[in-house]
Image (cartoon, grey):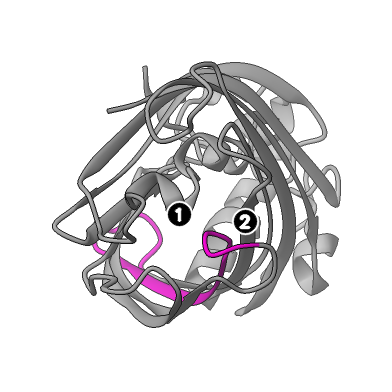
Amino acid sequence: MRATFYAVAALAAISAAPAFAQSDNSGENTDSLTIGIGAATTPRFEGSNDNHIIPAAQARGSYSGISFTTQGTGLYVDAIPRHEKTGGKFVFGPVIHVTLDRTRLKSIHDLQIENLGKLDTGVELGAQVGYSINGVITSDYDNLSITVAGYQDVAGAHHSYVITPQISYGTPLSKSIYVGVSAAAHYVGDRYARTYFGVTPAQSAASGLPGFTPGSGFKDVTFGGLAALSLSGDLRHGFALFAGGSYGVFLGEFRRSPITRSNHQFTGAIGVGYTF
């Protein structure tokens, strides 16, 4: 069941319901909850050249103007309410993230990587900060967000941190169709780099891979897109179909790691969601 919560960037489509889904016609905030389930194709581990298909789930919602969204294995909360239909607001709130990379050896299907050994589950806590604007280009309900999230491992899996700047834009094309695009990068600490992309002398002897000791730096950049189609004719209520995908490319030392079988990482997902 842990595979259900694998970090699937593409399924952010299910949690990326449009801004107007949380606004009535007067522009006042209303409580809402969107839950989505679907199927995703994602790399078997960070750097894998082989994808597999897994179930996945996402959710987002708003209560009294405070919103939350899940992205892969992360929960992001914006604790600053939006009081106006259009215009800008600051974004700030806690982040909880789980890293499951190479925690299940039987799903890796790469003997050398399996021989590196099983990794512990990472549990990271942190916060996000940024700025969000409604009514940018197409209508009162399109949204541009620029955020930076940072979180630190508290479970002892990698004893390090991840910093993620992200920019995203989404717009409804009608009451029943929504599209969005995003770009993000991941800056990781040296212990994260060594845990997930390094090869110690003992691991080298066990796997046959050359030793490798990477340092901190930007690990990758990722670009994504998504679309949603309401089955009820109104994305604010009822069922909707979602589809999304992302493309990521490794940078610097992470490209050169012997664990990186492919510098290009693809994810894709389709699903159905329901908005209450």
Quadrant, the C terminus: top left
94 to 49, vertically: above or below? below
Tell me which numbered mark, 1 or 2, is placed earlier along the sequence.
Answer: 1
Q: Say which quarter of the image contains residue 194.
A: bottom right
Q: Residue at x 63, y 40 (%)?
A: 174
Q: Is residue 41 visible?
A: no
Q: Magenta span covers which residues?
A: 139-159
Q: Is residue 140 magenta?
A: yes
The answer to whether the residues at label 1 and label 2 have Cβ atoms under 8 Å apart is yes
Please, what secondary structure does the residue beneath circle 2 have?
strand
| Residue wearing tag 2 | 170
Quadrant, the N terminus: top left
In this rendered view, identify the residue nearer to me: 119 or 150.
150
Q: Is residue 100 visible?
A: yes
In this rendered view, identify the residue nearer to me: 133 or 58.
133
Q: What amino acid is at disc 2? A: Gly
Q: What amino acid is at disc 1? A: Ala
Tell me: 6 left or right of 264.
left
Q: Is residue 151 magenta?
A: yes
| Residue wearing tag 1 | 19
Query: How many other residues sit within 10 Å of disc 1, few (<14), some (14-19) or many (≥20)?
Result: many
Q: Position of residue 255 (x, y in %)?
A: 83, 62
User: Outermost residue toward the front?
Assistant: 26
